[in-house]
Amino acid sequence: MTEEKIERYADLLLAYCMEVKAGERLLVSTTTLAEPLVNELYRQCQQQGVVMDVLFDFEKKQSYFNTYAHEAQARYVSETFLRAMQEFECYLVIRAPYLQSTAALASPEIAAIAAQARKPANDLYFQRTATRELKRNLCQFPTAQGAKDAGMTLEEYTQFVENACFLTEENPADQWRQVRANQQHIVDKLNSCTQFTYTGPGFSISFNTTGRTWINSDGKTNMPSGEVYTSPVEDSVNGNIRFSFPSIYQGFALEDVELTVKDGLITAWTCKNDAHVLDEVFAIPGARRFGEAAIGTNYRINRITKNILYDEKIGGSVHMAIGQSYLQAGGKNSSAIHWDMISDMKQGGQIHADGELVYENGKFLF
């Protein structure tokens, strides 16, 4: 990214996404590859009277943890992270992945210990972000791994990121305000209904949203955004769903994941490769129920990049997430995992709301 685009990006994240104010505290979590953006964020924070701290991940950290981690390490939670979840006003996660070698999962025992250790901090995160007591955002900094996953050159991928975030515009925040306005009529309609069915090639899944809220995702919590989402009533989900896009989990790309659901509980699962990943994930408490149902509305994102932050927003797609619900949507499922899986709806996909056809072939009909 050019210096101008980085400056524009930092301003968008601070002023629009998190609405950071003088005297507030911001924790930034990222890798060392995002240092250019971190530098600019820090400069702007100092000019605005904002306190900023940074947690940097290094290249081999996750790989070494998954391969070698011992119990004491798995039980450790960064004191800076814990304090930020307890007290800070703002939290920014910048994805900036390193080039990866062969993927490996931590042992189930170590993964369970780590998940349990982080649960108090994660619970605070979900509680405080639900009310925006903790203003958080998740974004991407272009790296070689991101470009490789997307099947692009780094230059192409950088342009893709810039375009999806409106960084090509002089005032990106104005563009995101327009996205918010455009999506409001969608959530107004969906919030007037309670029974939904997603259908597509080889699947049909229904859920109820009584007492739940569809939320207009306008860049405040994800950058880029462009989706509407809710948390379905936990025991109301029934049917089956096939996710036509790769489902990415800790370096694994699972193809054609299909889930069968009875009264909210996922009873069976299949995929074309690395099925052991599903077996291990569904052993996590709360993972066999859905925490989210959503519809992607960002038509600037028109291809798969194997990056859920972008792929779940693809215009003409739907996604559902297993695990943790969104408290702000009224969800009640609790889990250490929240894993989004996506299906293309542009080839015959439909959504019915209270029996009315409201969406077909990737487009709303109202």
Image (spheres, rainbow, N blue to C red):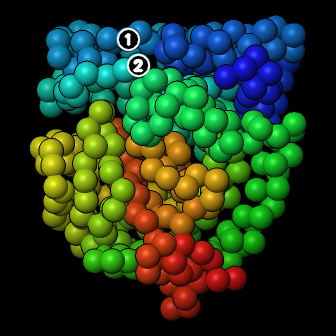
Amino acid type, residue under disc 1 in the picture: Glu
> Mark 2 Cα within 10 Å, few/some/many (few <14, many 20+)?
some
Label annotation for residue 76: none
Taking the spot 50% from the left edge, 23% from the top edge, the residue there is 143
Taking the spot 46% from the left edge, 23% from the top edge, the residue there is 144
Q: Secondary structure at mark 1?
A: loop
Q: Is residue 344 left or right of residue 273?
A: right
Can you identify the residue that label 2 sits on?
98
**CB of mark 1 within 8 Å of CB of mark 2?**
yes
Q: Nearer the viewer, residue 309 or 4?
A: 4
Where residue 46 sits in the image (x, y, percent)? 81, 8
Q: Is residue 233 left or right of residue 128?
A: left
Q: Is residue 139 visible?
A: no
Rendered view: 139 above or below 297: above
Amino acid type, residue under disc 2 in the picture: Tyr
Q: Nearer the viewer, residue 170 or 206?
A: 170
Can you identify the residue that label 1 sits on?
59
User: Quadrant of the rendered structure where residue 200 is?
Assistant: bottom left
Q: CA distance from mark 1 to mark 2?
A: 6 Å
Q: Is residue 234 visible?
A: yes
Where residue 155 sits in the image (x, y, percent)? 58, 29
Q: Nearer the viewer, residue 365 or 116?
A: 365
Rendered view: 15 above or below 296: above
Q: Quadrant of the C terminus?
A: bottom right
Q: Secondary structure at mark 2?
A: loop
